[in-house]
Image (cartoon, rainbow, N blue to C red):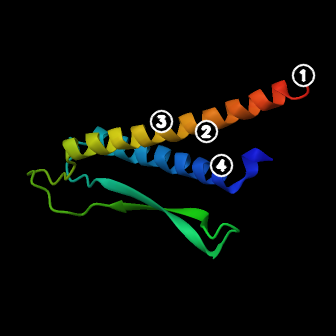
Amino acid sequence: MVLNNKHFKTVQASVDALWLKQRVISNNIANIDTPNFKASEVSFRHVLNTKTNDQGEREVSKIQIDITKNDSLSLRLDGNNVDLEKEQLALWETYAHYSFLTQNMSKSISNLRYVINNTGK
């Protein structure tokens, strides 16, 4: 089935990781006035198989997600190290990437629906 292919699963895992990243960034922004709060960061990367497919391309086997506390020094007296401008930019980038992937998933499903509804007519 089309929805079980590796590309679709990779896109789905990427959307899930971006959703988690958005939640962490939103939490950082929400705690901008919390004394001694340390911002968290989410990074994720595609972990590639050592095997290659028939076209000689490497295949994604999973996505590894890391959430870390940013223990950098704070310029604020209350010990909070949330940089609002950095967090807002990261939130916008995450939203743009998330929107792009969800639109592509939606188009793929719409194309599949069109083929199913118009086959045999």
The residue furthest bottom is 50
Residue type at mark 2 is Met
**Count of numbered circles in the view:** 4
- Mark 3 or mark 1, earlier in chain: 3
Q: Residue visible at 66% across and 37% down?
A: 108
Q: Determine whether, in the image, residue 7 is placed left or right of residue 35.
A: right
- Mark 3 or mark 2, earlier in chain: 3
Residue type at mark 1 is Lys
Q: Identify the element where label 4 is drawn.
A: helix
Q: Residue visible at 57% across and 38% down?
A: 104
The residue furthest right is 120
Find the distance from the CA under tag 4 to the CA under tag 2: 8 Å
Circle on res. 8:
4
Q: Nearer the viewer, mark 1 or mark 4?
A: 1
- Near mark 4 (Cα within 10 A), the count class, few <14, some 14-19 or many ≥20, is some
Residue type at mark 3 is Ser
The reply to whether discs 4 and 3 touch (Cβ–Cβ < 8 Å) is: no
The residue closer to the viewer here, 30 or 5, is: 5
> Which image quadrant is residue 67 in?
bottom left
- Mark 2 or mark 1, earlier in chain: 2
The residue furthest top is 121
Residue type at mark 4 is Phe
> Which image quadrant is residue 94 in?
top left
The residue closer to the viewer here, 84 or 100, is: 100
Q: Would you name the residue on which mark 3 appears?
A: 99
- Mark 4 or mark 2, earlier in chain: 4
Q: Identify the element where label 3 is drawn.
A: helix
Q: Would you name the residue on which mark 1 appears?
A: 121
The reply to whether discs 4 and 2 touch (Cβ–Cβ < 8 Å) is: yes
- Mark 1 or mark 4, earlier in chain: 4
Q: Would you name the residue on which mark 2 appears?
A: 105
Q: Identify the element where label 2 is drawn.
A: helix
